[in-house]
Amino acid sequence: MDEPLVTVNGEARSLAGAEPPTTALDWLRGIGLTGAKEGCAEGECGACSVLFARPGVDAPTEWTAVNACLVPAAALAGQEVVTAEGLGEPDALHPVQREMAVRGGSQCGYCTPGFVCSMAAEYYRPGRCESGVFDNHALSGNLCRCTGYRPIVEAAEALGAPADGDHLSFRTTAPPPAVEPVQVPGYVRPASLAEALASLAEPGAVPLAGATDLGVEANLSGARPGLLVAVDHLPELRVLTRGEEYVDIGAGLSLTEIERRLDGAVPLLDAVFPQFASRLIRNGATIGGNVGTASPIGDLPPALLALDASVVLVSADGERVVPLADYFTGYRETVLRPGELIASVRLPLPLARLTGFHKIAKRRFDDISSVALGFAIDVVDGTVERAAIGLGGVAATPIRATAAEAALVGQRWDEATVGTAADALAEAGTPIDDHRASAAFRRAMLGQALRKLFVEAGAA
């Protein structure tokens, strides 16, 4: 791509000079589209929400709400973006804008354009009109500081179907924008996996997918990687395969895509998704990125450890499969070699019949966990045949609770066994005191979690 171009509100715009660390938000505001705003610079408030035309799950193209404050402006090359300004005109409001206005959904107005874009993404979601349900979780990543949520929700629930001839609705029936190679200072979108691996072998190169972690590091900590190598568009990383022996989930798929493609096939992951940040973040965050950051408090690793997952790693030398339990080697350290990339996360089949995910945090949704636990247990004729428990927030890495697992396997699934295993679980890891919780609180939550699962399983 000689001159990077992006289509914004139907008009082709040049991205010349929009190099890292310039964000999509800063670039959009720089060309006069100031509806989207910076509120937090870490993807928690949604004031920067805009719409991207992306490959769809239930339609060729879907309008997807994304945090523009996290995405590098260079990543817009070849793409289609719609901001709040592009949805309607002052004398011809878009249905979402009109409902927000007539129902008093806008107070100070700072957050309104972001709410409008997130609401519009749900408005155009394939299948919404057939179901007759507006999913209010589509707004979960948008913060109203005036606490005007009731009229905002009323505006969302009042929306009908897009009118015949609605050009944004019609756009979903056509193929998504073609993803073309891009190379600008500090950013490269390779044409193939082989090119991506070659670029990642360069000093200072880091892989970039949804930017929901790297974007925060750049905005708040001033992180400046030598080269961002975009990988989420690569076909090899965007495949989800459900076979007889395992489920293979491409590392470049967003969590929203995974949730919708699995469609309930992995109940434990279904329990994680609603508690993983917000819809805005899940629209960008990838499973490869979440595992790749190796955070000890990431939400997915405890569940994936309970599912006995492995990671498929790819490099110029070929592939290798590493059990996730062996993947983490230290605080934010892994077995990844230079030039190596996570290609997929592999879940062996059959899945355990009893699963659960418990996340203890200061807020029920959109928060970082103090403790997270994933459970996968098989009980046959009253006896535990298999038990896997993944933990986050209690050690320098996500870990398996091996002592608690051993206390369960081969024993009767009863209150006495659960009590013994719960005591062992309370001693797992090396929890610390920090601003989210004390070590004593974390241990108490570990001990109670298995007991809670036992009670819930009995109630079910």
Image (cartoon, grey):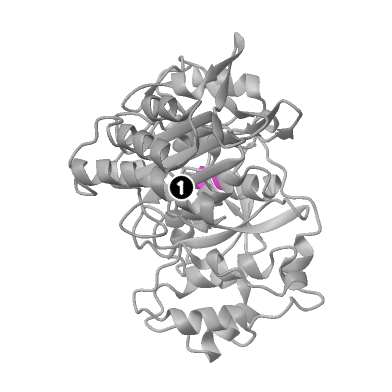
Viewed as shown, does residue 261 lie left or right of 325? right
Residue 187 visible here: no
The part of the chain drawn in magenta is 71-76
Q: Nearer the viewer, residue 66 or 432?
A: 432
Asked if the stretch drawn in magenta spans residue 266, the answer is no
Q: Quadrant of residue 4?
A: top right
Residue 169 visible here: yes
Q: Which residue is mark 1?
A: 453
Check disc 1 and report its element: helix, strand or loop.
helix
Q: Amino acid at mark 1?
A: Leu
Image coordinates for residue 268, horizontal then vertical, percent: 56, 44
Asked if the stretch drawn in magenta spans residue 73, the answer is yes
Q: For the point 46% across and 47% down, which residue is it?
A: 453
Main SS, magenta residues: helix
Tell me if residue 432 comes above or below residue 327 in the rendering: below
Viewed as shown, does residue 387 lie left or right of 43? right
